[in-house]
Image: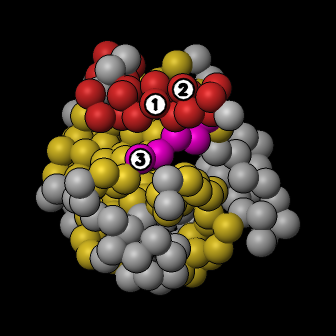
Amino acid sequence: MWRKLLFAAVILILLVTGGAWASDYEHKLDVNKMDVFWSIDGDKIHVKLSAKTTGWVAIGFDPEKAMQGANIIIGAVKNGKVKIEDHYGDRKRGHKSDEKLGSANHVMDPIGLEENGVTTISFSLPLDSGDKWDKPIDPEKWSRIMIAYGSGRDSFKAGHAWRGVYEINYTTGESKKIK
C-alpha cells in the first residue's frame, strides 16, 4: 500500500511542478486556456494536454471533415484515476473507441491529474500503429490537429466547452490556427 502512495505522490509532484516533464517536451502550443506539448522520440510521439476544465481533454490527429477520419485521444481524471482512450472519428460530429470498432487502444504510459480546476493528461502513441483506425503520423510534414476540452463532466459524451483546429509541424513546433 505504501508503495502505491509513494508512486502517486511522485506522479503528483511531477504533474504539479512540471518536474521532469517540462524538459521532456520539445514543443508547445498554448491556446484558449489549453496547452499542448509534444515530442517525437524514435517511432513514438509523447503528448501532454492541459486545460482549465474538470472535464475531459482531447486531441485529434489528421481530421478530414470536422471529427471524421481523426485519430482522437481523449482523457479525463475522475476520483484520482486517469482514463485515456483511443477513438476514431467515425462521422463528422462523433467518434467511437477503437475497441468498440473491433481494434485496440494504442495509448501507452497514461498519466493524469486534476487539480485546481485543471485537467492534465500525458501519453505516448506509436507514430504508426498499423491499425486501420489510426493514421500514421509523419513528423517530417505539416499536419492538422484538433484540440478540445469538455464542459466540466468527465463523461466522454459530454459536449465541448472549446475546440480548435491547427496545422502544426511536429519537428519545428511551428503552428497556425485553421478554425
Q: In this view, does 31 lie to the left or right of 156?
A: left
Q: Distance between the residues labelled 1 and 3?
A: 11 Å
Q: Is residue 25 left or right of residue 179?
A: right
Considering the numbered disc 2 on the image, is that residue within a helix, a strand or a loop? Answer: helix
**Camera-side mark, 1 or 3:** 1
- Residue ID at (47%, 40%): 122
Magenta segment, principal secondary structure?
A: strand
Q: Distance between the residues labelled 3 and 2?
A: 15 Å
Which amino acid type is marked by label 2?
Leu
Residue 26 in percent (x, y) is at: 32, 21
Which residues are the magenta region? 109-113
Please name the residue that numbered disc 1 is placed on: 9
Which amino acid type is marked by label 3?
Leu
User: Which label sits on residue 113?
Assistant: 3
Categorize mark 3 by other alpha carbons within 10 Å: few (<14), some (14-19), many (20+). Answer: many
Colour scheme employed for the rendering of this structure: secondary structure
